[in-house]
Image (cartoon, rainbow, N blue to C red):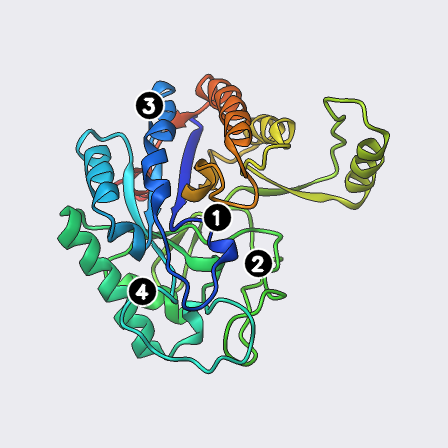
Amino acid sequence: MSKYLIITIDTEGDNLWNWHQGDVINTENTIYLSRFQELANKYGFKPVWLSNYEMLSDERFVKFVKDVEEKQQGELGMHLHAWSTPPSYELKNEENGQPYLIEYPSDVMEEKIVEMTRIIVEKTGIRPVSHRSGRWATNRTYFRLLKKHGYLVDCSYTPHIDWSQYKGQSKGACGSNYSNVPENIMKLEEGMTEIPLTVIKSHHFFMPRKFCLKKIISNIYKSIKGQNLWLRPNGNNLDEMLYLLDKVKQSDKNYIMFMIHSSELMPGGSPTFKNEEDIEKLYSDLEILFSKASKEYVGITLRDYEKKLHKR
């Protein structure tokens, strides 16, 4: 049975971790995306560029992603950030967090989904069917509206992870709790196919590559307590990601899902990769990861994987 690697990129403005209401959102990270695409091409993988409003407002990105689709080297999907997607709607500013789409009235939610979809189609000619929510937040209304407007597959679930400690903007608004969702693919009641991000709870001990007593003690603690392992690079987790490749290969799962933010591919575009040295380390890790994965997994987009699931 083939095992598949699905690469997903939350394609969004520069360093939104430091964004505050009213700040200009820049999209300079778009000029750094071709390097990642070329690396994926090298190993036969097909990134899914889950793109938000400001990126689709940048003609450089539109040109890039249209070329990716025309060459069948990847997929354009939708990633919706409620605070930057038209139409504007003012929520009461009672918390300190960026607003979740699920905070808005259902008619406003629908208007934002419709507008995002319209922009994608008008700018690129591509009808998106894949989606990931901003800040991972979902609910049944959200899924119902996505299905209504032609979306088939979502990849917002992060098994074992509770986002409810992260506030929205209006009173009582918080992130979704995925602590108890399964790691497996689900057909949701609303008709959407949910393909969760690969997150596995593990008690495996990882020996640091460089001897450091403090790090060893920390890793022992993590192995006893258990930790959530993602296929999501942070500059210091190559061994964990390689372990995940092996773990899924040996399991009955037939896919593994990688994720990164587009702005993490740019020096200073995120708190994680702050300079060119960090970016070079990231690409060194990605080269090792993708080289190993290419021997064990077949690259596929979300759109094509969903077709395989339902034999369309």
Q: Is residue 89 left or right of residue 223?
A: left
Q: Are marks 2 and 3 in contact (CB under 8 Å)?
A: no
- Residue at which label 2 appears: 178
Camera-near label (1 vs 3) is 3
Residue at 52% in and 24% down:
289
Percent x, y of residue 191: 34, 60
Residues at marks 2 and 1, CA–CA distance in whole angstroms: 10 Å
Q: Nearer the viewer, residue 244 or 89?
A: 89
- Residue at which label 4 appears: 85
Q: Image height check: is 185 above or below 63?
A: below
Q: Specify the quadrant of the image occupied by residue 117.
A: bottom left
Q: Are marks 4 and 2 in contact (CB under 8 Å)?
A: no
Residues at marks 1 and 3, CA–CA distance in whole angstroms: 24 Å
Secondary structure beneath label 1:
loop
Q: Specify the quadrant of the image occupied by residue 112.
A: bottom left
Residue at 33% in and 31% down:
46
Q: Are marks 2 and 1 in contact (CB under 8 Å)?
A: yes
Quick check: can you spot residue 145?
Answer: yes
Secondary structure beneath label 4:
loop
- Residue at which label 3 appears: 41
